[in-house]
Amino acid sequence: MVVPDINPSLRDDAAYLQPMPCLRRGTPGVERYFPSLVITPTMVRWGGAALLLMAVLVLAAPGCTGGEDGGVREIDVSGARSLIEERQGDPSFVILDVRTPEEYLSGHIEGAINIDYYDPAFRDGIDRLDRSATYLVYCRTAVRSAAATAIMAEMGFDDLYDMQGGIVQWRASGYPTT
């Protein structure tokens, strides 16, 4: 049985209808274990592309630790709350809200400063900060804060915390905002 291709525009006319030699009827075990399986050249091409993509991702993965690489550490809201309490009053600890000014005014973590990630002058605002300080960075849901901490690490900041879940998770946990 030949399985039709999902996208006929990708087929190799005559070769398309021919099963691969390894799955030809009569090959020991094929009919018994794979009675309806036939591999087409298109499947082989896409399978090869998928295999190549997986190989590239696996080789790139050692550089993507997600932990303390580049000075960025992910922290959940309870850990962030503990960190804020531990470092309260420490001038070298900064809470950075990277949401828009409107979002910031709708409620933020007490003591946070605001530098809008979407502002074209975002990098300039970050550049004026003390690179030796410790930063707890958050946004609405941790998308902008992840991008912001990556930029900050690239700019030479080495003690960064990215609060996972953002202000949404902070509020859902019952923690206060001002």
Image (cartoon, rainbow, N blue to C red):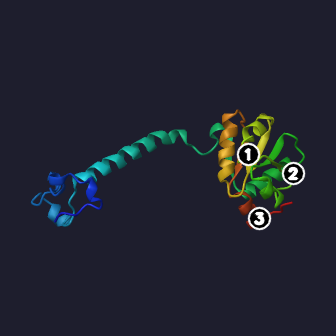
For the question of whether residue 71 can be seen, the reply is no
In the drawing, what numbered circle is on residue 47? Answer: none
Seen in the picture, residue 127 relative to 8 is either above or below; the reply is: above
* Earlier residue among tags 3 and 2: 2
Write down the residue under mark 3: 171
Element type where label 2 sits in the image:
loop
Residue 48: x and y, percent? Answer: 31, 47
Element type where label 3 sits in the image:
helix
Do the residues under discs 1 and 2 have CB atoms within 8 angstroms? no
* Earlier residue among tags 1 and 3: 1
- Image quarter in which the N terminus is found: bottom left
Q: Amino acid at mark 3?
A: Arg
Q: Amino acid at mark 1?
A: Asp
Q: Amino acid at mark 2?
A: Gly
State the CA–CA distance, disc 1 to disc 2: 21 Å
Write down the residue under mark 1: 119
Residue 98: x and y, percent? Answer: 75, 49
Write down the residue under mark 2: 111
Dot 1: few (<14), some (14–19), or many (≥20) neighbours within 10 Å? some
State the CA–CA distance, disc 1 to disc 3: 25 Å
Question: Which residue shows up at 23% across the image and 54% down it?
Answer: 11
Dot 3: few (<14), some (14–19), or many (≥20) neighbours within 10 Å? some
Do the residues under discs 1 and 3 have CB atoms within 8 angstroms? no
Question: Which residue shows up at 72% across the image and 46% down it?
Answer: 161
